[in-house]
Image (cartoon, rainbow, N blue to C red):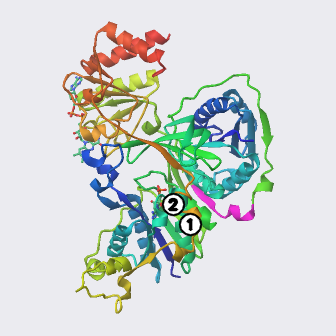
Amino acid sequence: MNNVSVICEIEEGKIADVSLELMTKGRSLANDLKCKLEAVVLGHNLDGIEKELFPFGADMVYVGDDERLDPYTTLPFTSIIVELFRETKPQIALLGATTLGRDLGPRISSALQSGLTADCTALEIGDHYVKKEDKTYKDLLYQIRPAFGGNIVATIINPDHRPQMATVREGVMKKEEYDKSYKGTLRKLDVDKYLKPEDLVVKVIERHMEKSKVNIKNSSIIISGGYGMGSKENFDLLYQLADTIGAEVGASRAAVDAGYAEHERQIGQTGVTVRPKLYIACGISGQIQHVAGMEDSSMIIAVNNDPNAPINKIADYVIAGDVLEVIPKMIRFYKQNTK
Amino acid sequence: MGLNIIVLAKQVPDTRNVGKDAMKADGTVNRAALSAIFNPEDLNALEQALSLKSRYKDSEVTILTMGPGRAADIIREGFYRGADKGYLLTDRAFAGSDTLATSYAISRAIMKMKKVDLIIAGRQAIDGDTAQVGPQVAEKLGLPQVTYAEEVLSAEKNKIVVKRRLERGVETVEAPLPAVITVNSSAPACRPRNAKLVMKFKHAKTITERQNQSEDYIDLTADRPYLNIEEWSVNDIDADTEWLGLSGSPTKVKKIENVVFQAKEAKLLSATDKEMDELMKELIANHTIG
Ligand SMILES: Cc1cc2nc3c(=O)[nH]c(=O)nc-3n(C[C@H](O)[C@H](O)[C@H](O)COP(=O)(O)OP(=O)(O)OC[C@H]3O[C@@H](n4cnc5c(N)ncnc54)[C@H](O)[C@@H]3O)c2cc1C
Ligand SMILES: Nc1ncnc2c1ncn2[C@@H]1O[C@H](COP(=O)(O)O)[C@@H](O)[C@H]1O
């Protein structure tokens, strides 16, 4: 009762990364709250799936395994989770801010009349004092998220309603095993008990999933190249660095226009907006339209041979030098230091 | 068979074009400095509705918006592009509503309407970026939902077939009507204003707007009823005020911080082996990479 629950998603037969990241976060919230961590997994052919979750500190894994739960459709998932939550009464429920999470989350919150905060970038436990009532709410979930097109950061709380629900995008939280030999309990759900015939009215007729090619939006490290990279061939250096440190490659519009990179990689006002942990801007001047798409990055490193490039103003580290010299060195010294 | 389609559209501050004066000194948003626009994905939603209207004879497209009086602009804009009817939900009691209270009000209003076949919302509003209102309305009405819609392929025999655009692929689903769908920005853009419709509807007004007109204003709604924009308050939708506004909103804003983009204190490095080696060591040690 009153535990932290993570609604896990299945991707290619395994627990999705975003769910494992939330398990890591959930475990630390459960530790702060001195309660248990639970996971809910729905789908089909899930034998042994709990073993992927125990090392992340899952005390209880609820599994609903049924062919009617794959592929995902809204209503059956909603019915099962709403009913399960009525029984287990979690105080916190977390989901990935994926297409599935953003389809399912609001549905559950509407049924349970509980608050839901989308796209949180940080989750913390804290108190809340209400002067008017002279009352302190203890141990609430602070749901911290950018709002207003990224112009403000808001801390949202749900004082009176449970569960306190939040979605988080992939890559925002850090995925870390808790204890390899952690022992939790598996509880299989009797799916028939939860499903009503009218939950099955929506049918997936056709489904075509691509393996993600470019996934810069969710990447925690982005190496971006600009016009200053000089050529498409030189862009290969960025891919090499990206492979070495586990990153994705982004680009400025000038680089895309020059044919150095595909349009899907464009970052900025007319491309994608990213807020990775680390953004390395290589040969990018930092015009406002580019900066609009990456200024929320936690750390920015600018590599530019112009000491007055505007990008330097928002960078944490400025490496004054030629990209063709700096990037190979980054690769070399990363390898040397991680052997 | 004609379809009765409701489009949920919201007037939002244009957060994509935020200037320096958009934030007040106390860190709150200066809404006055931002222009109010038709939420972009709601225009994609409107286009889906209008395209269905042209495919299925006798269909009717109704815009429903909740907001302050000036949100009537959204309805007029909808008329100029081909919508037939509009409802403005406006009441002090709605102020401060979060997505859940908003969807409660919207669902109550929809329950008041005659026969509704399809409710089309935008995927998300750019002021909150939550993408919650569509699914929450569906749940409150007990209807199936199809989110991330890119195209309604057909709406026949009480069924819709919809193509969805997901993060990693496309899906075609079939759902019974009535249903709620939410439309992505990858869907076709909305058709432009039609000059004839602009002429026809430019004097469309809510009752409040008509009352605020100067003395010599001639009310045309008597012989042109289509110029009336229906205005509904809490009482018109039989809503329980407990479930609206701040009291109906489980989520509260505890704190708001301005994001300040002041020039950071950047660490300047040269490209020497020593400095590059130290930088990589530091990034690995503090788990930024690796
Ligand atoms: C409506 C509109 C929308 C736009 N949307 C976007 C958008 O979404 N994304 C986007 O990126 N841009 C966008 N732009 C374009 C933007 O204004 C800039 O033109 C563009 O970002 C510049 O790209 P860049 O920094 O790669 O090129 P440049 O401005 O040409 O900068 C190249 C940089 O590389 C440095 N350099 C050169 N050689 C080297 C070297 N050997 N080693 C190290 N450094 C070197 C130079 O000092 C310079 O700073 C938009 C523009 C408009 C008008
Ligand atoms: N006040 C409102 N009036 C009408 N429709 C709304 C309102 N708020 C949200 N919506 C609809 O719900 C969608 C999602 O909004 P949101 O959950 O705020 O991102 C929007 O694109 C609109 O279609």
- The picture quadrant where one finds residue B217 is bottom left
The residue where tag 2 is placed is B245
The chain identifier of the residue carrying mark 1 reads: B
Residue A14 shown left or right of residue B4 in the figure: right
Taking the spot 34% from the left edge, 16% from the top edge, the residue there is A328
Q: Position of residue A323 (x, y in %)?
A: 27, 21
User: Residue A201 colored magenta?
Assistant: yes
In front here: A307 or A42? Answer: A307
Disc 2 under 8 Å from ligand 2? The reply is no
Secondary structure state at the residue bearing disc 2: loop
Above or below, A118 relative to B88: above
Taking the spot 43% from the left edge, 64% from the top edge, the residue there is B45
Q: Position of residue B196 (x, y in %)?
A: 27, 80
Disc 1 under 8 Å from ligand 2? The reply is no
Residue B42 shown left or right of residue B203 in the figure: right
Q: Alpha-carbon distance for marks 1 and 2?
A: 8 Å
Secondary structure state at the residue bearing disc 1: helix
Q: Residues within 10 Å of mark 1 (few under 14, many from 20)?
A: some
Which residue is farthest bottom?
B223
